[in-house]
Image (cartoon, rainbow, N blue to C red):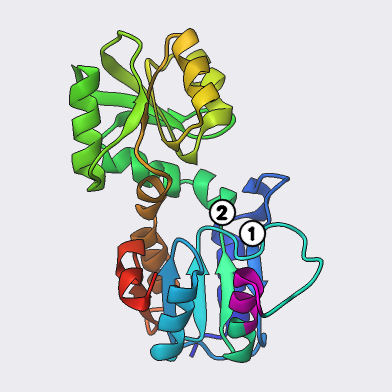
Amino acid sequence: MAKIKDIIEYFDRILPESLSEPWDNDGVMVNTNDEASIKRVIVALDATSAVIKKAIEISAELIVTHHPLIFSPLTRLVGSDAYGKRLMECVKSDISVLSYHTRLDEVEGGVCDCLSQKIGLFDTQKMEPCGRIGFVNEEMSYDDFRRHVKNALGINSTSGVYCGKPVNKVAVVSGSGKEYITDAKKAGADTFLTGEMNHSSLIEAREIGLNVVCGTHYATENVVLQRLKVLLLEEFPDLEIEIMPFEAEREYGI
């Protein structure tokens, strides 16, 4: 049976820490015991209370997420606040948590690649310093591209800004992509697909003539959960792995 230390070593090998942004905190969030045997795993975007509750219910020893459970430095741990409660519940229940954030965004086959594949881009290349850039199968209008993204990601709506250009070359950054507007433009993109962007960033994009489509933070990153499951099973085929999408958390009171 796999041990938690084996899984940590495996992820560090296929998702090198060198790919993580300097400001990020990813990797081991909670490790209850290096020698702990792992049989059941939950894969989710975040270690929410609902995910932890599900892990306890099915006796999962490990939660693997994209977003870090611990992001900012801890100054205190208080069980009465939502953040402290989650951490303490994991420790109390002997549940380890591993989170792979920006390194999973950028690694080959990671979040940005999964998103590019989901919307059908081809001739996709890495965009510096972050993301991917590629072409739609056939030039289309901005409105048609928005409908295409909605259908591909299974969401009800998108937001963004239209600059009067058809969609051909698309830059992709999952989650929050506001920092990469100028990079997308320099790379030759006419359209930028990301998860979310604030008002001032949308104005900036319009000023430089870059279409933007925001497909929600969750939907542009949720695409990697199946990939995480596959990666785990390739190395540890005996694991029982359950993917918990955000919408499934409603039955747990979220």
Q: Are marks 2 and 1 in contact (CB under 8 Å)?
A: yes
Q: Percent x, y for residue 93?
A: 57, 90
Question: The residue under label 2 is which amino acid type?
Answer: His
Q: Pointer 1: what residue?
A: 26
Residue 64's spot in the image, x, y percent? 50, 70
**Left/right of residue 8 with respect to residue 161 in the rendered view:** right
- Residue 254, magenta (yes or no): no
In front of the other: 118 or 94: 94
Provide the residue designation for mark 2. 101
Which residue range is magenta in the image? Answer: 80-88
Name the secondary structure under disc 1: loop
Please state the horizontal and vertical placement of residue 67, each as a whole percent of the image: 54, 58
Which class describes the residues within 10 Å of circle 1: few (<14), some (14-19), or many (20+)? Answer: many
Residue 39: x and y in percent read: 44, 88
Q: Which is nearer the eye, 177 or 187?
A: 177
Secondary structure found at label 2: loop
Instruction: Report the Cα–Cα distance between label 2 and label 1.
Output: 6 Å
